[in-house]
Amino acid sequence: MIEWVSFRSGATPVPEPVATPLVWAGAVGGASVLVALLNHLVGPYRPTLALTVLSLLAALLGLCARFVAAPGTALLCWLLLNGFGIPPAGTLSWASHRDGFWLTCLFGATLVGTVLARLVHAHAAYRRLSTVTDAPRVGP
């Protein structure tokens, strides 16, 4: 006998992503702490190291976010990198090649994290919902 069960009644096949405002709050808070920590420990104005660390943060935030959060996450990380990771501190600037590359890296890292999370969750859901293949086969 087949029993139909609604996914909303208990187990969800794929976890719900975190709300976008919470992801953005994590981006602002995390990027602020990381840039300040890097400026204090390694020394100020090490943009390559800061970009690498913020890209990792963006990828981690992407693991629990929706796709629509990616542009905002990248932009918020870039604002803190640009404002406090390069001289003069507290001043936003735009150098098209450098900042375009930074935004691309941060956006790409966020998308990679989000895509990776979606693939892992989809694969886990498929394994939970797939039929049992241990039944004996009839035929050739």
Image: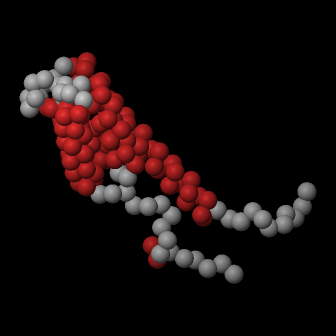
31 on left or right of 129:
left
- The residue lying toward the viewer, choosing from 82 and 36, is 36
Above or below — where is 105 with respect to 70?
above
Is residue 97 visible to the viewer in this orientation of the structure? yes
Residue 68 point in image, percent of width and height: 31, 47
Residue 48 point in image, percent of width and height: 29, 25
Q: Residue at x 10, y 29 (%)?
A: 89
**How are the colours assigned in the image?**
secondary structure
- The residue lying toward the viewer, choosing from 101 and 43, is 43
- The residue lying toward the viewer, choosing from 39 and 66, is 39
Residue 126 point in image, percent of width and height: 59, 58
Is residue 110 visible to the viewer in this orientation of the structure? no
Residue 100 figure quarter: top left
Toward the front, the furthest residue is 41
130 on left or right of 114:
right
Residue 30 point in image, percent of width and height: 25, 45
115 on left or right of 129:
left
84 on left or right of 97:
left
Q: Residue at x 18, y 27 (%)?
A: 44
Residue 82 figure quarter: top left
Toward the right, the furthest residue is 140
Quarter containing the C terminus: bottom right
Q: Residue at x 33, y 57 (%)?
A: 18
Quarter containing the N terminus: bottom right
Q: Residue at x 49, y 71 (%)?
A: 11
Above or below — where is 38 with respect to 67?
above
Count of marks, rendered view: 0
